[in-house]
Image: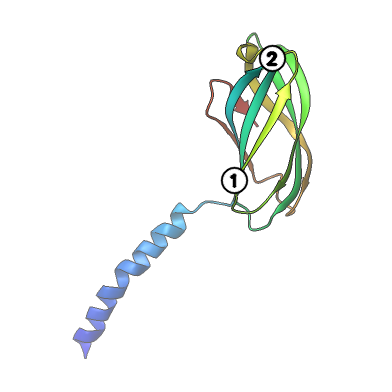
Amino acid sequence: MIRPLLLSALLVSPAFAQGGALAQETGPATLSIELNALEQTGDACRLVFVARNGLAQDIAGLVIEAVAFDAAGGVARIALFDFAQLPAGVPRVRQFDLPQIPCDSIGSLLVNGVQSCEGPAACAAALTFSSRTDVELLG
């Protein structure tokens, strides 16, 4: 009788160990904004973002205030970016144009604040920022 119990404990243990490891690897839910690309369109710089809502609920609307700095660190533009609806678990691509700004003159972008976040109470606190470009996105 001891052997079957020991055998079943050994067979079950890896599943529990793996489940525990998976639980440790899973971090807090985030609402991530990634600066994915910059495209020159005429006299404007088009900023392309990928937003991923990793929260359990949809976001009905997200508006952030962003500041574009030039290469020397001076403020080039302050703008509001309306990301609109962001469904849970579904990535969304959003584009915003900064008129009369060449893309190669942008040194960094700062998310200066969240104008509104219509969703879970912790939606603004769950925001994370990253960049795939040479332009750093700060939050």
Question: Which residue is identified by label 2?
Answer: 42
Check the image and name the residue furthest to the left.
Answer: 3
Where disc 1 sits, the SS reads loop
Label 1 sits on what residue type?
Answer: Pro
40 or 51, nearer to the observer: 40
33 or 5, nearer to the observer: 33
Picture layout, residue 128 above or below residue 104? below
- Which x, y percent locates residue 87? 66, 52
Label 2 sits on what residue type?
Answer: Gly
Q: Closer to us: mark 1 or mark 2?
A: 2
Q: CA distance from mark 1 to mark 2?
A: 28 Å
- Which x, y percent locates residue 113? 75, 33
Q: How is the image coloured?
A: rainbow
68 or 41, nearer to the observer: 41
**On the rendered structure, is 107 left or right of 66?**
left
41 or 54, nearer to the observer: 41
Picture layout, residue 2 above or below residue 63? below
The image quadrant of residue 19 is bottom left
Q: Quadrant of the C terminus?
A: top right
Q: Quadrant of the N terminus?
A: bottom left
- Which x, y percent locates residue 38? 60, 23
Check the image and name the residue furthest to the bottom.
Answer: 1
Where disc 2 sits, the SS reads loop
Picture layout, residue 129 above or below residue 23? above
